[in-house]
Each structure stands twice: as structure tokens, then as C-alpha cells.
Image: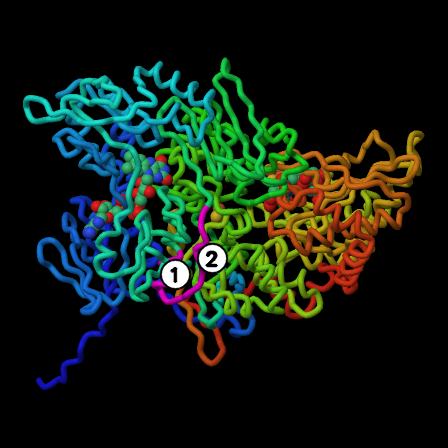
Amino acid sequence: MSHWTLICKLDDIPPLGSRIVRPEKGGDIAIFRTADDEVFALHDKCPHKGGPLSQGLVHGKRVACPLHGWNIELDSGQVVAPDVGHCERFSVKVEQGDVWLAC
Amino acid sequence: MSTIPVPPAVKPRLVLIGNGMAGVRTVEELLKIAPDRYDITIFGAEPHPNYNRILLSPVLAGEMTVSDIILNEYDWYRQHGITLHTGKQVVKIDRVARKVVADDGSEVPYDRLLIATGSTPFMLPIPGNDLPGVIGYRDIKDTDEMIAAATQHKHAVVIGGGLLGLEAANGLKLRGMDVTVVHIGPWLLERQLDETAGRMLQQSLEAKGLKFLLQKQTEALIQGERGRVAAVRFKDGMQIPADLVVMAAGIRPNYALAEQSGIYCNRGIVVNDTMQTYDPKIYAVGECVSHRGIAYGLVAPLFEQAKVAANHLAGYGIGRYTGSVTSTKLKVTGIDLFSAGDFMGGEGTDDIVLNDPAGGVYKRLVLRQDKLVGAVLYGDTSEGPWYFQLIKDERDIHDIRDQLIFGQSLVGDAGHQGESRAASMPDEAEVCGCNGVCKGTIVKAIKEQGLFSLDEVKKHTKAASSCGSCSGLVEQILASTIGGAYTPAASDKKPICTCSEHSHQAVRAAIRERRLTTKEAVFAELGWSTANGCEKCRPAINYYLISTWPHEAKDDPQSRLINERSHANIQKDGTYSVVPRMWGGLTTPNELRAIADVAEKYQVPTVKVTGGQRIDLLGIKKEDLPGVWADLNAAGMVSGHAYGKSIRTVKTCVGAEHCRFGTQLAMDMGVKLEKMLFDMYAPHKVKLAVSGCPRNCAEAGIKDVGVIGVDSGYELYVGGNGGIKTEVAQFLCKVKSDEEVMEYAGAFLQLYREEGWYLERTCHWLERVGLDYVKGQVVDDDEKRKALHGRLLDSLKNARDPWQTSREGEAKKQFIPIAVDA
Ligand code: SRM
Ligand SMILES: Cc1cc2nc3c(=O)[nH]c(=O)nc-3n(C[C@H](O)[C@H](O)[C@H](O)COP(=O)(O)OP(=O)(O)OC[C@H]3O[C@@H](n4cnc5c(N)ncnc54)[C@H](O)[C@@H]3O)c2cc1C
Ligand code: SF4
Ligand code: FES
């Protein structure tokens, strides 16, 4: 069962930017902040060739992978056509400026 | 239950008359930008969904089938909630009641009406033109009728030796008929070709078995015993057998319906630059339209009209249609004929002609002053797309005029456009090396999915979507597959990305002229369709902002791609490489020691000497970057910007400092240049080299700025490139002193920084604007040069080492992963 873990302050993530969360077990998780202060979390591994999505460029509700530019929907983890694939996503919430991650 | 009924939100109704190429394209463009705005109804007289009319020729020739050329299946209409009436002709537009009436009596009201009724073949007004077996060549029905005739009858006569007539004749011949083309002119395509070339074309078609009767005027079509046409009689009394007569003597725009409803027409429905008719609720696009007195008969301009009409229907009101330059290609397999622009020429134009009847090649270029305005190519059309681009760009060609006719490769400014050999490439040939896409795949996608633009090919095949070096080649494949239906946008009109319609040029201009200093202002002012751009436009806009307003605009790290954001090069495994600057390729024992220490301390797996005369530390973890930089900074080293669209290296040779042939102090000159340019961002990366003598050991001939020492001073070369496609730098000028080298090189680079488009290397920018323009600014005009150089120094006056500034404060956060024990 996953539980909510306090990660950081919202302001620790730049708008249209991201941070890496490194759990003790399992791979890195990328958390993203959009221009409207929505926060999303994805496995930090591009379904194409494993690029670190946390290092990508965030636009709208998407991130463009830093390695070969695939675009991934932040809310669903779905790869944007014409590419195909899926990236594992995690639940996050923001409460009073604190970011919580279900992991 | 007592609820008050709420009327459903009603959308305004858009009705389209004409389910053809221009009309449906407009609806597609509209759905892209305003998907929910209208309740849409389409009337089409033909009993088919929208199909690619231009491919009727390959269908007739047996190279494709009707199902191959459908552009929008019935499903597409359903998915978009469009009510489609096929096989129904609209017979009345009631502008007072705002409704249309179809031939089956059905009526549909509209709030906005779009007329795209196309045109009909012109049937010569001669006796017998209504006999069975006499048809035009316009739609699936005509094509089916021709195919059927070919199975039952022998003699076909095509009246009209234009592109359409020749394609019809070729198809009928391939279907086994005995075909005669009757043409009133003295030779075929007399408007495009001169006599020699016209005869060459005729010979090749005769070799395929077609017969020609030139300068013949048809007098009547004679009815046979079974009621069907049986012969064609000419004014001179001659008569030939004909079981099928295809009229290809021109088209007439379909505007009667509009005219009857009182909309102003003049050989077409008259529209303004927003594609609006005299009735503001009614728009019109396509062949039925007369825009600034011109009715276009090719797909590419109609698609441009569609885009503009859609934008206005969507209520954005941006964009005007100002007319098109067109090109056409004869779609007869095995025969290459291409024409573009104003190929007729006339008063005030010159022709350059290359004529090789034995080799089967004819080329005619039409020039007005220093611009190419038209081109006709026969036999070898591989350079067609290049000429067409030069025409559309209105590029000043006087510097390449003497070699123009021989094509782009000989002119030697091929840039990254790709060799012009698309047509002759085999299907298996790889076109896009990055994504492994071969020509066959691209051609198939173009045909089956009905693609018309480079962007669509990128989307569907991934070709040209990575490094982009093959985009020229892909454009040529487009051109050779769909002929005149493909028009490259003029370079300065191509949108930056799919977030807006605006070109690099337009965005640069807006930022300068409207004093925009933030990306938000750019998005708002220019009506971006996305909230905060995408990975293509954001880095470009960020660069334009900081290069135009170096002290007002603030750099936005989140608009930079990862390398520039983390001041290191990301590797395929997510680690980074670090390249400290070695000014002019020089180093010291102290620096080398520091590098060795860093390599050991951070267990750097690979240490490599780069092609840029310095050392690369590869495989460093992101969280170690600040530490690595701190150690290197402590030894006096700074960022080498090996990751940036920025100054990279100034390579030098040992020069007069040591070399027995050296004429100038190359190392010293190189270090001075590199210090002047430290931390300079540009549209793309910038590399320089300084050699001490013309032996040129620093390879200055393939650098953005190459400096070669000679006895009396320095020679400056610009626009070289050693990357994807080698480009030799061009001679700019000769100068005497070190100070002049700095001033001229600095001014050249500042001009590039101010006017280049993002991701355009100096060689591409030079190809676009021409060396003469650059000389005019940098060499001939002392004042401009000094001002440019001054602006460069001013924008770099606060330059700081990014390795120093980004390992402190907020900027440091990106390097620290958040640990959680879950
Ligand atoms: C490290 C180095 C190779 C080496 O081991 O020698 C290198 C490495 C890369 N080059 Fe290069 N280039 C290196 C010298 C060159 C040279 C030679 C030179 O500079 O004299 C060239 C040809 C000269 C030129 O640019 O005109 C060169 C032409 C390219 C190109 C093609 C550019 C073009 O306009 O055609 C690219 C692609 C691009 O920039 O879009 C490229 C891109 C790259 C990238 C940045 C690809 C990327 O985006 O990841 C490579 C980073 C590798 C990595 O993981 O760190 N690299 N690259 C060289 C670094 C030089 C330095 O000290 O800064
Ligand atoms: C064989 C052939 C080859 C061609 N090759 C090329 C080429 O290589 N390159 C190129 O650029 N162009 C080519 N063209 C020209 C190109 O097909 C046309 O320019 C283009 O189709 C015009 O688009 P449009 O929408 O204006 O008209 P259309 O595509 O003709 O569409 C108009 C539609 O409206 C329907 N319609 C008309 N009146 C009514 C009414 N009252 N009610 C309901 N529906 C109505 C018509 O039935 C038709 O389906 C070719 C044309 C043909 C016939
Ligand atoms: S040539 Fe340059 S871009 Fe290509 S693999 Fe080598 S370093 Fe990478
Ligand atoms: S690894 Fe993400 S696009 Fe290739």
C-alpha cells in the first residue's frame, strides 16, 4: 500500500521545471510543476531509451525528453503521437504549499 | 419532477458547399484551431468522401486505385460530428433566410457559409460535344468512364495538349487505347516550353506510343451508328476515328450558384485577402474563387487560402492571403517536366537557357533584375525545388548567376538542403539517418495518408524530425511525389513550430519593434495557441529575447534545453560531460594537474581530447557537477560552453610564436578572440580558428569565422562548417591589425546574433541573406561595423562564468535530488 510522503515545498520546484525524487528503493521519480502550479510525477525514465525525463523541457501539461525529444503527457504518462509508449505515473498532491507524493 | 428545461447551448452553424480539396482542407484547418466552434454541415455533389483529385492521373494510369486516394474516410466526418450529404447538389443559396437548398429539396440554415465548388472542364462549343463518349477529366466518374471505355473501345482522342491532357492521354494509352492528342498550338505546352523543348517532350511521348496532331482546330464531333461519338472532324476537313473524346482544353470556375444568389462574381467568386465574399457571412476558397483577379488551378495555393479562411472563420482574424507563386510537374511516369513561377517571362526579363537535345535535357530560367522569377525544366528536374525556393524567397542571385543554371551542387551553396537527387533514389535508400526512414516509406505515407507538407511527413514518418539535415531531401521527395500540390513556404514565412503561424523572422521583428522582453508577452502579443509554447519555440524565443534586449530581458532557464540549463552535455545514460575552456587550445601544467585531480576525485570514467583542442571529462553524475566546477574554478578554469548554442572554441595553430613558416601570432590572436567572445550565446554554436599562415593547420576554412595570417595582416573567412555537410568558408576581407580582426569578426558575429534564426549556423544564415549583404554591413560601412562591434561588447560586458554562478543559491537546487526513505 502506498502512503503519502512529504517531498518538498512547491517553491522548491521551479515553474515549468522539475526535481528528482530519489526513493530508497526503486528508480528515480521526476516531479514536475506546470505554469499553473499543478504538480505531476512520473518514473524518471523515458519509455524510448530511458532518458531522464526530469531533465526535459516542461510545456503545457507535457514534458519533452532531453535525449531525443519524445513528448510525454504529465497527467497520464502517455507518449504523444506519433511515438507510442507509456510511462509509469505516481500520485502527487499539493497542500498549503507542501508537495506530497504517494510512494 | 419539475425541472425547467434548459435549451442546449447552440453553436453557430457552418455550411460548406463542395466536398472537395479546398473546402475540406479549410474545415480541417478550422478543426485544428477551433474544434468546437461550429456545427458543421457539408454538401458534396459527388457520391464520395473527400479524395485527392490530383491523384486521379495515377489512378487512370493504373498505378493507384480510388481507395488509395481517399483523404477523409466517412469515419472522419463522423468523428468530428460533421453532417455530410454526399451526392447532393446545392441548387440555391437564400441569403435573406440564410439557408441553402439542395437538389433533393433539403434545406439547411447557416450562420457562416463556405463556398468551395471548384471548377468544371471547359467543353468546346462545337456540334456533338454532348454525345455519349464525350467527357471532361475532372472526377472519379470521368476516370471510371475512361477506364471502362478502354476495355470496350479502341480510339481515344484527347483535345488539349496541356498538363491535364497529357496525363489523360498517357493513362488511356497505358490502358491499351490508341490515343491521339489534338492540340491547337504549334507545339506541346507552348506556354511553358519553347519549340525545341516542346519537340523533345513530344518525342518522348511518341516513344510511349502517343500520337499528336498539332495546330489542328476541331470543328465537330461525329455521331456513330450506335449513338456514341465515332469521329472527330477538323476545320481542314481531316477526320479521325474516336470512340472516346476527352476535353482537356481548360477549366471554368463554378460560380453560377453564387452569382445567382447575388454575390459579386467576375470570372470567379470575388474575395478579399481574408477569403470573404461581398457578403460578410459568406467565404469562398478554391478554384471557384477570383482573388485579386486570379483564379488558381493548383492545390498548393488553395491550401494557403484554406488556412487563411479557417483562421477568420475561427474568429482569430489573423493572416491574409496575398497570392501565390506556383509550380507544376507533369505526372507522367518516366517523363520529367517541372515549371514554376513566371516562366513565360516578357518585358524586362532575361532568359538563361541550357539546351541539350541529345541528352534530353532542357532548362530555362527567367530572371528579372537580380532575382529568379520563373523556371522550366525538362529531362532533369532534380533542381526544381531549389529554384522554386529561390523564387519564393526572392533571393538576390547576382553572386551565383553565372552558375545558376547548373544547379545547387555546382553553385556550392547547397547548405544542408540535401542533394537534389530525390527522384532517382531507390525506394530502399535511407533518407533520414537519425530515425532510419527510407524513401519508400516516405513516398508510401505521402500517398496513402495524403500528406502535403514537410510537417505532416515529419509527424507521420518521423523523417526529418531529429537533426533535420534531411529535410531538404524530404521536401524534394514531396515535390516529386505530389508535384504541383507541394509548395514550400517562403523561408521567412515558415512557422517556428506548430504553436503558432509566426515565422522566426516575424517573431524576431515583433520582439524588437514592440519591445517585448518576456516570453509571456510574446505569447500574448502574437496569439500563441499553447499556454507556454513547446520545446521548439521556447528556446528560440528565449534566445531572441536575450539577444535583442541583453540587459532588459531576463534569461529563463526553464526555456533552455537541458545542456544549457545544466551547463554540461547530457550523455545517453543520463550522466554529463564537462569540458573546461582552454583558451586558444592552450593549457598549463597547473590546469592539467587540476583536471587529473578532478578525474580521480570524481572517478571520471573517460578523459578524452576533443576535436576542439581541449579535454573532455565524460560520465559525471549530475549531482557531482557543482563540485567538479568548484575544483576547476579554483584552478582558474571556466566553462568551455561545449554544450551551448554559444561560443565554443577558437582553435589555433602554433603560429609565428614557434613555427618556422608563421607570419602572425596565431595563438595570441586566438586567445584574444576567445576572451572577447566568452559567454556569447548565438542562434547556433560558433567556432573560430586562427592559423599563422595559409598552410592553415588550424582548419580555419571550415569555421564560422576563420582567420588566416599572411605577411601583411590577416585574411578573414566566414560561414564555414565542418559538420553535417561540409561548407567551405567564404572570403570576407583582408585586414591589417589584431584590433581589426576583433572588430570585423565581432561585427560579423553580432550581425548573425541579431538577425540569424535560432538553430541556423552561420553558413545557413549566409546562404539565406547572401554574402554581399553581410559585406555591406560589416566591411563597406565603417559606422555600421563599429556599431555592431560595440553592441557585441555591450551585451557581453556582464559576462560571468556559468559554472561559478550556477552552483550557488536557487540555481543549485537542480543538482540536488530529493531523498525520501519510502
Ligand atoms: C566532444 C566532441 C567530440 C570529440 O570527442 O571530439 C563533440 C561532441 C558532440 N557534438 Fe560535435 N563535438 C566535438 C567537435 C565537433 C566538431 C569539430 C570542431 O569543433 O572542430 C564538429 C565539426 C565542426 C563544426 O561544428 O562545424 C562538430 C559537429 C557537430 C554537429 C554538426 C553541426 C553542424 O552545424 O552541422 C553537431 C550537431 C548539432 O550541433 O546540432 C554536434 C553535436 C555534438 C554533441 C553535442 C551531440 C549532442 O547534442 O549530444 C556531442 C556531445 C557528446 C557528448 O555526449 O558529450 N557536433 N563537433 C567535440 C567537442 C569539441 C569541443 O572541444 O567543444
Ligand atoms: C486529373 C487531375 C490532375 C490534377 N493534377 C494536379 C497536380 O498535379 N497538381 C495540382 O496542384 N493540381 C492538380 N489538379 C488540380 C486540383 O485537383 C484542383 O486544383 C483542386 O482539386 C481544386 O480544389 P477545389 O476544392 O477548388 O475543387 P474540387 O476539388 O473540384 O472540389 C469541388 C467539389 O465541389 C463539388 N460541387 C460543386 N458544386 C457543388 C454544389 N452546387 N453542391 C455541392 N457540391 C458541389 C464538386 O462536385 C467537387 O467535388 C488536377 C486535377 C485533375 C482533375
Ligand atoms: S559525431 Fe558527434 S554527435 Fe555523432 S556520435 Fe560522435 S560525438 Fe556524438
Ligand atoms: S530516451 Fe526519451 S526520447 Fe529517446
Residue A39, x across and y down, in percent = 45, 69
Main SS category, magenta section: loop
Q: Position of residue B274 (x, y in %)?
A: 40, 60
Q: Which residues are magenta?
A: B308-324
Q: Which mark is residue B311?
A: 1
The quadrant in which the N terminus of chain B is found is: bottom left
Amino acid identity at mark 2 = Glu
**Which residue is drawn at the image coordinates 5% and 24% (left, top)?**
B226
Q: Secondary structure at mark 1?
A: helix
Is B272 drawn above or below residue B267 in the view shown? below
* Label ID, residue B266: none
Mark 2, mark 1: which one is toward the viewer?
1
Q: Is mark 1 within 8 Å of ligand 2?
A: no
Residue B311: in magenta span: yes
According to the picture, the residue beneath numbered tag 2 turns out to be B501
Q: Is residue B95 left or right of residue B343?
A: left
Is B303 rendered above or below residue B3?
above
Work out which residue is located at the far bottom of the displayed protein and give it. B2
Residue B268 coordinates in the image, percent (x, y):
31, 51
Q: Residues within 10 Å of mark 1 (few under 14, many from 20)?
A: many
Name the quarter showing ligand 1: top right
Instruction: Please tell me which residue is depicted at 71% across the width and 60% down the height of the picture.
Output: B802
Q: Which chain's residue wears label 2?
A: B
